[in-house]
Amino acid sequence: MPLELVNSKVVKSVLAPNQNVLARRGSMLYYTGDVRFVPHSMGGSAGAMPGMSGVAGMAGRMMAGEHVAMMAAEGQGEVFYGHAGLYVEIIHLDGSSMLTVEADRLLVHDGYLQSSIVALTSQGGVRGAVRGAMTGQGLFTTQLTGQGSVAVLSHGGATPLQVGPDHPQVVVDPQAYVCHIGNINVEISANVGWRDAVGKGSGEAIQLKMTGMGTVWVQASEQKF
């Protein structure tokens, strides 16, 4: 069954035999029925990023950092999830679209969705990608495909923004980015000058430029978690 919001910070999953859900480890709040929990490791491999051979060690560490420990819930009953009092948004996948989400924003999803860890490319080159990663927007990110539900976390709530004919480009602060769905291209842009280096810049030197067709969710805060 699809995930259900109990309130703005708690989500419910209804388990049935031969089904499971995957959630951030430690996010279970309470459950009813006959439910068991087992550790789970997200699979998938990273796509290649052009020009990354010189920073392969750094890329490997960032890819490892994208991984968040998960647990699977199995059995029959209802399980309730939440994390650190953060807001929860449920996104439904219809099987035709792919959801790209930062791993630390991922709370719970249907177990039959396929997951992989992929590289974010940067048309601005390696320098731009690395600087973007340093702000909290990783070089590597998580993708989910299939038909099912996903619950994502945000600080202060998430707002969906449409990218398309009316808004062909949406520019997002990396700290505010939560996830996106659809055919969206992401360019990590870095405009770093001497004023930023000495701490006198605008604070908006790193940006994510979204183009194409789809929806991007941004949180109402630049706070990391």
Image (cartoon, rainbow, N blue to C red):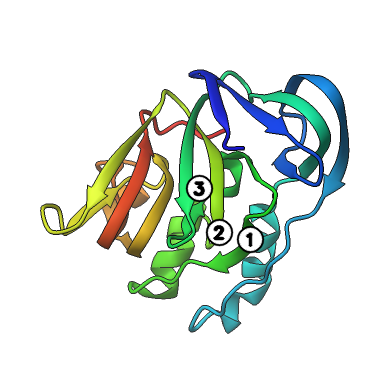
Q: Is residue 58 above or below residue 204?
A: below
- The image quadrant that residue 65 belongs to is bottom right
Question: CA gap, disc 3 to disc 2?
Answer: 27 Å
Q: Which of 7 and 217 is in front in this view?
A: 7
Q: Mark 1 points at which residue?
A: 114
Of 78 and 57, nearer the camera is 78
Whether residue 43 is visible here, answered yes or no, is: yes
| Gap between marks 1 and 2 measured at Cα | 6 Å
Type of amino acid at the residue the image marks with label 3: Gly
Q: What residue type is labelled 1?
A: Gln
- Report whether 16 appears left or right of 115: right
Residue at image x 73%, y 25%? Answer: 79
- Depth-wise, is mark 3 or mark 1 nearer the camera? 1
Residue displayed at 42% across by 23% down:
156
Q: Do the residues labelled 3 and 2 touch (CB within 8 Å)?
A: no
Whichever of labels 3 and 2 marks the residue nearer the N terminus, that label is 3
Residue at the location (81% across, 47% down)?
18
x and y, in percent, of residue 84 in the image: 62, 22
Q: In this view, does 121 lie to the left or right of 111?
A: left
In this figure, which residue is indicated by the disc labeled 2? 146
Describe residue 223's horizontal placement relative to residue 198 as left or right. right
Question: Disc 1 or 2, which lies upstream in sequence?
Answer: 1
**Other-residue count near label 1 (Cα within 10 Å), few / some / many at <14 / 14–19 / ≥20:** some
98 or 33: nearer the viewer? 33
Name which residue lies at 79% across and 42% down. Answer: 72
Query: In the displayed structure, would residue 130 be above or below residue 200?
Result: below
Q: Mark 3 points at which residue?
A: 136
Left or right position of 194 against 71? left
| Number of numbered discs | 3
Asked if the residue under mark 2 is in contact with the one under mark 1, i.e. CB atoms within 8 Å, the reply is yes
**Label 2 neighbour load within 10 Å: few <14, some 14-19, many 20+:** some
